[in-house]
Image (cartoon, rainbow, N blue to C red):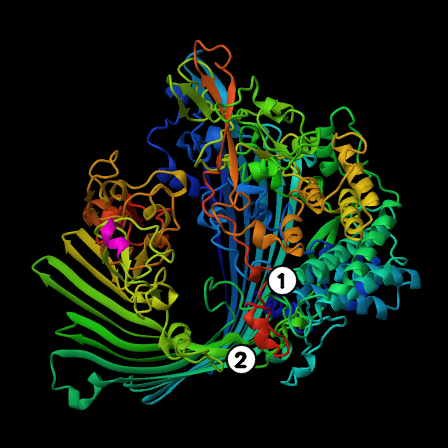
Amino acid sequence: MKIGTQLAARLERRHQTGVPGYDDYFNPLLSLYTNWPTERPYANDNPNYINATHNINVNPATYVEDISGYADSDWRALKSNFYAQYSFPFGLIAKATYSYNYTTNVGENFEYTYNAYTYDPATNTYNINGGNQNPFRRKERREIAENFGQFQLNYAKSFGDHSFDVVAAYERYDSTDDYIELISNPPNNTVPLIYFADQTALGNTYGVSARAGYIARINYNYKQKYLLEALGRYDGSFLFRKDSRFGFFPGVSAGWVISKEKFFSQIKFVDNLKLRVSYGQTGTDRQPYGDTNAPLVAPFSYLQGYDYANGGAVLNGSLVTGVSPRGLPITNLSWITSISKNIGIDFALFNNKLTGSFDFFERKRTGLPAPRYDILLPSEVGYSLPNDNLNSDANRGMEGILTYRSKIREVEYSIGANATLSRLRTLDYYKPRFGNSWDEYRNSGVDRWANVNFGYHVLGRFQSQDEIDNYAINNDGQGNRTLLPGDLKFEDTNGDGIINYMDERPIGYAQGGLPYLNVGINGSVTWKGITLQFDFAGASMQTFQREYELQIPFQNNGNSPAYLLNDRWHRADPFNPNSEWISGTYPALRKDNPGLSNFAYRNDFWITNVRYLRLKNLLLGYSLPKKWMESIGFKNVFVYANGTNIFSLDNLKDFEIDPEISSTNGIIYPQQRLFNFGFNLTL
Amino acid sequence: MKNIKIYIGLIICTITFSACKKDFLEREPQSIVVEDQVYGDPKLIEGVLANLYNRIPTDASLTNRWTEHTAYDDAVWSGSGNAGDEYRNNIISYPVDRWRLWDYGFIRDVNLGIEGVQKSAKLTAQQKAQFNAEFRFLRAYDYFEMVKRMGGVPLVTTPLVYDYSGDATNLQLPRSKEVDVYDFIATELDAIVNNIENNGSTSRANKYAVLALKCRAMLYAGSLAKYNNQMASPITLPGGEVGIPAQRASDFYNKALDAAKQVMAGPYSLYKSNAANLGENFYEALTKKTGNPELILIQDFLQSKGFKHGFSYDNIARSLREDNLASSAIAPTLNLVEKYEYLDGTAGNLKTRNVDNSDYVYYTNTQDIFANKDARLYGTIIYPGTSFRNTPVNIQAGVALWNGTTYQIIEGDLGAKYTDGKLLTGLDGPQRSALDLSNTGFYLRKFIDNTPLASTRTRGTDIAWIRFRLGEVYLNAAEAAFELGQTASALSYINTLRERAGFGANSLSALTIDRIRNERRVELAFEDHRVWDLARWRIADKVWNGSTSNPDAMLYALYPYRVVRPGDAARNDKYIFIKQVAPRFKTPRFYQIANYYSSIDQAVLNNNPKIIRNPFH
């Protein structure tokens, strides 16, 4: 009999300047683009007076805690784990585990009011001119309680060359998530407490989730040479209606260690060679697209009835909480099944100096939700058919790793490389139908690579007004009246004389998703306690499209990156409308006009196939000599310096953005470069 | 020791699995109520009603699609420069699906409500009659909103239930005739008018709200019957889904007039509490929610309970904003300003040039050009030289510098001083391309909250949206009476309304349909009437014909300049005004024949083969 427990706790505090707007980062980042070079952050450069810039919201002088306020977030978490295990004399082990996790998050936002000023040199006065009179105070509190229990039986036995290992288990999990927030309109910038009189909103949500599952697994091997595993799960989720709540997910895998065969013993340079093949199903009750942590359906979707607190109205002076009929209950939807198929080989050669593995894989998802649209419910019924498990897709790809480890005198070193090439393919759709062959070409997903990136292909640039005037193709949908020399000339794919959506064709890889090709290179060198480690990561076959601030000059009445403004088509003399055109990389400037065909027609001038190789991590360390350390009672002391994201080789340098961001205007919290210095002690 | 271990082990096993519910995966929702609970409790039925009241469709209210106030001719968009906002100044032509509404989710919810109330075992007969009437009011309202956009739609009056048989053809209903939908609305409203209670309420429909809805719907039906058939080629479908027979016109006008008379005989009266300042009085008539005898049905808000909106945040005049973003999005046009007549009854065109057009007219103060105008101008629009929230706005585009032969226009940053030390450009602009700043020279006053901090996002405003008020009923009555040839009573209704605007008693002695229509425009600006009125009069395609040479299709601004002309005391430091196309406005308004009825969604057509398309789509 063994019993045991593990306890862990975490305290975390985040403290930052509270900036109004979408989140606390967006406006400061936006201000990099939006401020005009003619504006100063402070009126008359006097730091006591915030200047009333054309858009005070992005004046960087306001991004100071004393002016703008603060946003704090405190996490406090306790994780506990208890277990008891009893070993029967005949080889059966029974084990029960119980975990209880409790997490709280307290958020405190306080955004202050402040004035902005305009300086009047004639009178030497600072006059209030706007600012922010919108105080904001929010206190939020979240409590998450999670229970996990598992009961497991394990039986392992060997009969001669045959070994068995059998596991059966039952487990269950549930959690509650209680959230409450208070928002007030504080009358001053000093008192952080929230008083009833100032309160403007109260929010309360309660989430629950529950899952249970039965698990069985049998492992068998013969002389560690032939390996076989069969596995099955029977999982249930509270999201689904009772009769479709559980799903069965079996799996099997086999391995053959060829290097242990007799006939192989002659081949001396091979230390290990193993063939693997596996097939396994798992289930998920989470969203297949977008936020993959979100539930597949809203909890209780299988229930009819009425939703409380849906809308509402002020009736006769008091607020009446709205109640509304729910849509059709979702009764059939159940687990999405994920089917993994894998075939691979592991090997070790030359006294284990060269090791590696190579795999082909497919991860197929079946039962993706979609409605059975061939039953046509008239729209006049006022509801639509719920989703069923109908569609499927698959990620197919290959990956490989090679590592070489060796030693030259006292220098130990290793170098490794890995690569994954993988792409999503959509497979089956429920009874696909198309209006015409173009519709099928453009919109079908049946058995086709996913994320085809459609847009216009740019043939070149208009060289002169003459060329525009005589151009036979309607390039901008408005008879070419919006065009200037230097504007983009699109390919009229279908030759109908007008550029419109019918002319779009694939122009790039998936955008905003995972690159199809990921590579990594890593290595280490050790000499007498000195260690150098490096870690490169890279990717290719991913499209980045520039939009908004990275595309449109003076977007949103703001400024633009210098390259957009300098390297452009323009007249030799800006004050002479008859002077000649000088060519440049970017189109001629027209202020803040996103409707121009250059921008509004998504095209391949603005897209880039992102390629990068980045030094993700570099570590230099030294283990202090043992003799010295042992004398003062330590087994080992390792001091190190390490840096992350040291540099990257990429093809987005010209646009002054990081290759790993997906935000098309570049406005997102960037990759950070961190340097750590530290030591590890072993007692 | 071993025993202790076993006990602890047992305890762990017990905790792990003892919290046994009947079914571990069967959880109780916290915010779902079942049908029997709802229809057994009048408070919960009120909740169903509240949900529906809040979903009554509008084209542009204070909350729903408020931005669309700038998509017609009373205002241009002066807010953010996002492509999704700015396009309202550059609408090549209105899309044929612009006003599309197929609101059968609403209809289903109402029908479920009617059925639930009917089946309830816990409600009294009187409660049942009352709830039934209120649900049917909401249904009639929604059908009116659909028919005015789409023409005849299927009349669904019971919940349509799909039986999962794989065949839903039994649920297919064809479109009703347009005229039948209007008749249905009239019949339904007649059936409930004596059952509905809510006396004295402005936020739940009572007898007079029912009559006001009927009045408006019947007026629409009447004008469609009359004017559609006066078109060169009337818009009709052979089955009558679109097109109302001409001979029904007087019947509908009579019903409208009759309903209007009943409302006018009711307990309502025009708001006249601020006789000392008729402009403020009109503003109060639209913004005061208590002690306002004019309101018949409103969509109310309640700031103290967090039920509020940001219409003031988005549209308050620039220099008065309290937040650090937005403001000024809806900038009223000179087109609208000039529709407000002078109090002597002359047309409202502003006098910027002298009679022989040889020079500007010079005004001592910027507000002087607006002197002696209809008080509703002040109540609706903030124009140069006026105040809001007791703070003067500061509208001046720049200075006009006399160079000996002509004026050179100089404009600057907001609040900038000219070299003479006096104001160059006002803190409220206008400027030609600035965002969140008027580019017409006017700001909106109607529906903007003058409470301190109401223009912040955190506090917000609870100004109510007006669905029906007595002012509109007077106009409906005048129009219906005039169309019926009862010019004398039409005159008396119009004159009553004009008197409140400062015109004096019986200011008009003769009436034309154009004058009635102009009265409607100035009285009801920004109350979601303009586009519907032009459509039912069948003149939208002429007023907004997409031509840059048509002054009704182009939208104009008025830029005030301070004259710098030292040595000419009669002109120096006076103000001149320049009319021009609003600088951010790019494309003339273009309403095509195909817009009179919006197109039906392809999905709707696919789902029900009995639905036929509207003409031109």
Q: Is the residue B117 above or below the residue A623 in the image?
A: below
Q: Which residue is mark 2?
A: A247
Instruction: Specify start and end residues of the magenta stretch as a single range.
Output: A465-470
* Secondary structure mostly seen in the magenta stretch: helix
Extreme residue toward the right, this view: B125
> Do the CB atoms of the residues marked 1 and 2 lie less than 8 Å apart?
no
Q: Residue furthest front?
A: B356
Q: Residues within 10 Å of mark 2 (few under 14, many from 20)?
A: some
Query: Is residue B576 visible in the rendered structure shown here?
Result: yes
Membership of B564 in magenta stretch = no
Residue at image point 64% right, 48% down: B530
Picture coordinates of residue B25, whole percent (x, y): 62, 71
B546, above or below B319, in the image: below
Q: Secondary structure at mark 1?
A: loop
- In the rendered structure, the answer to whether residue A233 lies left or right of residue B181 reads left
- Which numbered disc covers residue B422? none
Q: Nearer the viewer, residue A41 or A583?
A: A583
Please count the marks in the image: 2
Residue pictured at 75% horizontal, 57% vertical = B217
Question: Residue B101 — which label?
Answer: 1
Name the residue nearer the viewer: A539 or A157. A539
Q: Quadrant of residue A102?
A: bottom right
Q: Residue furthest left?
A: A409
Query: Residue A646 at x, y = what percent?
Result: 23, 48
**Residue A115 shows in the view:** no
